[in-house]
Image (cartoon, rainbow, N blue to C red):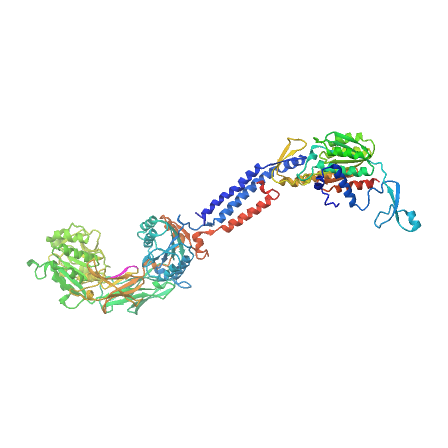
Amino acid sequence: MSETLLTPELISRLGRLDMVARLVVEGFLTGLHRSPYHGFSSEFAEYRQYISGEPVANIDWRVYAKCDRHYLKVFTEETNLRATVLMDCSASMDFTGDPSRLTKKTYAAYLASALTYLLLRQNDAVGLVTFDQAPLSMVPARSMRKQLFQVLKVLDDLPRGTATDLGQVLHRVAERIQRRGLVLLFSDLMDDPDTIMAGLKHFRHQGHEVIVFQVLDPREIDLEFDGEVEFEALENPGQTVRLEPAHLREGFQERSARWRDTLRRECRGQLIDLVEITTDTPFETGLGAYLQKRRRMY
Amino acid sequence: MPLGFANPALLFGALASALPVIIHFLSRRKVRRVAFSDLRFLEDVRSRQSRSLGLRRWLLLLLRVLAILLITLAVAGPRWGGLATGGDGVRSLLFVVDTSASMGTQLEQGTRFDAAVAACGEMIGALPDGSHVQVLTAGAVTGPVFGEWLPAGAGTRQGLTALRQTDGAFDLAAVLTAAAREVARAPSATVELVLLSDLQQVGDPTGLDRALARLVGAGHVKVLVRPVGTATVGGGVLDVRLPARAVQQGENVSVGATVLAPEGEQVFVLEVDGRPVAETVVQGTGQVPVDIDFPLAVPAAGLHRGRVRKGSDAFPADDARPFALQVPDRIRVLLVHGADRPVDGVAGRGRWRFLAQALQPGGGPGLFRVTEVTSDALTTGDLAAAQVVVCVECDPLGRRALGGLQSWLEGGGAALFLTGDPSRQTWLAGSLLPLLGLPDTPVYRREPAANAQRPRIIDAAHPVFAGLEADALTTFEEVRWQRWWQLEEGTQRVLLDLTDGSPLLIEGAVGEGRFVLLPFDLDPAGNTLVTSPMALPFFQRLTAWLAGGAGSTGAVNTQVGQRAQVAVLQDRGDTRLEQASRLLVSDDRSDQGRTADLVWYRGRPTLTGDILARAGFTTFTAGDDTVGLVAAGLPAAESGLALESAADWSSRLGARGLPVAGLIDPTAGIPFDEVLSGRSLASWFFALAALILLLELTLGRGLTPHSD
């Protein structure tokens, strides 16, 4: 399935999260020229002829010496990766700038579902933690097939949280995940960058690889609102700001860009992959980011 | 009001300028409420920029209101200056075209008059539809050209071709009076009076204030001045002075002239009947007129045409001034006397026979032809045939005769009254002195020989005494008076009195005529005049002077603008004038004669023609006979070369309640319709509105369209 057909809007109409996850992942994999399931384990599977342009790392040079042909060694998958999905359920994640678009939380849930499906197909263990200003629920990491349904069940019914205290939450979650693995954080990161980075550093300090999916609505970046608008804080009902976005747009975009630059710079410094993604972005972008990270890990 | 609008009704569109304000306040109420993820950045930015945003918003609102206002004003046709029409929107323009003599001054092309007519035509052509026009001429004749106000158009312009320049004067009072009549008949309440003139100095003529008051009272008048021509340097003949008494053929007299020779050396020539007879050279004296004299040997009896001329210049009308000279064959003297009484002797009552002999010695040929009539037989026919009436001790005249004499005098007659009869005090005090305008308090003086009074000549330069030798004057002053009526001189002029101050010769005027009163008779017992060798010259000179003055007949020297009118002599029983089928008047510029009228004007048969429009001669003929000659000269005011500015006129009229609303400057190149309707500002308003909109777009960039 092509990328253009797999838009978040279209996916959202399917409703069932397991179908969504499967559709996203299978469609994504169909678009790749080589299978991501190969090459990550040490158990030999077969030989196949080398095709020009492929990496030469897996060429079996002994076979080449015997028959003067290039063959690649193909291994069957076998992994013991433990991935933990951290899902931000704070009120700010319920924002959407356009009713026809997914909320950030829904978008993040779809993306997390797809990644969970992908991970479990590789026999990786996947766990889930939801939180707002404190952890709300936790599904321990397992690699069983029924784990998919347990994770999707939680993602399908994410609670409506309140305010965010991301730094504090990350610290608490990091304390509870003892075994090293991959941490996938889905959040809008609407908090103080310093406290966020402190939390993320905690994961890094414990040897986790971290991918941060910063999910934002396009309106949170461009502030494309017409007329005079009274903005009300989702995480703090009653707090309002009345202004004309058209006039303040430039300043807002500048301020927002500076904030994201800070996060980007800090994450790079901690070897954390920050995937900036908006809710109108195809899910494949998020999956691609994960695969790149996976390839670097192995 | 300097700023006006072609379509004031469209100004209601200015209400549209309230739209931005309404939209502004309406849109302020439409505030969307949006739940947003995080307000930190918004609060940050708002605190920095909200104040400037507010100012900018109000400025934008102001600019939008201004732009709409300006566009509305531009659509309404704003005009700066010009003259607003009355409430009815109809324009009525009264063009006053100066047709006076000074308008004959040559310009590079044509005359000032030609330029004025052309300008008038152009203005009429530029008038908007629906305008009405009337044209007034202001020269020898001041009056409307059209019988009624006409719609502006080609027909009206064609009517201008009938205008003719005259040699008359620009009579401002007459112009304003005529304008008042036309303003009262104008189709609109407001009338624009456009004066096309060289603005020659006209001073403040008599009746100006009254005429102005009439014009201001006639309607709402706005005056526009269109100057034509500039001042020129020239010169001319301002006036000609002929001898004030009747002259005889062959007599050497002096013809005087007042001339203007602004610069250089100018030659002035006296012509009689087309032949130059004398010339005088005048050095330039600037704008100061000078008097010069020409010697003249009086030509044969008859009517003669003369003129004083100079070389032609840019203003030809005053380069020659005509005059009519009448050299009488004989002066007709009607001697009226009272009936003789036995005591009066052969010399007659009051010594009238002596006087008749003095004027016509021996009854033979001479300057005077004396006809006698008793006072009780005097008729108006006798008076009509006389040039001078000499009344010697008349009996009291009847009411009818007295009225006839008075009317004849007022119409230009000349009379000599000689009365010294102490028994006629009632007639003297009750009738004659009141008729002559003298105080009616005569006192009869009778002095002994030892106390006889000598005469004193008060004005030796008077034509009666002018030219007499000193011995003659001394001889005259040796005459003695013992009896006379002592009169009060009143306002009349005394030429001769006695040593005790009693007036002895009173000269005065009655209407257009003049008289001389001698309050004594010619009885040697009363005075020694009859025995003096000066008696004859005294009475002859006195009578000739009376005949050659205002009472002259057949020839009149007048000025343009007056009606051609000349008194004629009509002998008793002479029906030549009445029987003539046509009396023609013609001037030397046109071959076509016009019918003249014979009317009795104040007891004198008078020929009248049209009002004189051009300088020159007008001849009255009856059959083949020339019976009258009128020489019309330029009015004195028209000979001046000085022009005034529109500002001078503006202040003159403005000081009297008629401000000049505008000046049409031909050198400024401003079209007349622009002067009339003002200069269009629409393009400026549109341009300004466009600039403001551009500024609004620049300032409003980044703001949503309905944010204000």
Q: Is residue B559 above or below residue A26?
A: below
Q: Which residues are magenta?
A: B561-565
Quarter of the image with the C terminus of chain B in it: top right
Q: Residue at x 84, y 42 (%)?
A: A38
Quarter assignment of residue A214: top right
Please state which of residues B148 and B523 is positioned toward the viewer in this rendering.
Answer: B148
Q: Is residue B189 left or right of residue A107?
A: left
User: Does B564 appear in magenta?
Assistant: yes
Extreme residue in the left direction: B342
Q: Is residue B291 left or right of residue B433?
A: right
Q: Is residue B72 above or below residue B637?
A: above
Please state which of residues A30 and A231 is positioned toward the viewer in this rendering.
Answer: A30
Label tally = 0
Please state which of residues B439 and A28 is positioned toward the viewer in this rendering.
Answer: A28
Q: Is residue B654 above or below residue A187?
A: below
Q: Is residue B134 left or right of residue B25?
A: left
| Residue B401 spot, x, y in % from top left | 14, 57
Dominant secondary structure (helix, strand or loop) of the stretch shown in magenta: strand
Residue A51: in sight, yes or no? yes
| Residue B362 spot, x, y in % from top left | 13, 67
Q: Is residue B591 above or below residue B686?
A: below
Residue B648: in sight, yes or no? no
Q: Is residue A157 left or right of residue B61?
A: right
| Residue B192 spot, x, y in % from top left | 38, 52
Extreme residue in the right direction: A66
Q: Residue at x 90, y 51 (%)?
A: A69
User: Does B158 appear in magenta?
Assistant: no
| Residue B73 spot, x, y in % from top left | 49, 47
Please state which of residues B401 and B252 is positioned toward the viewer in this rendering.
Answer: B401
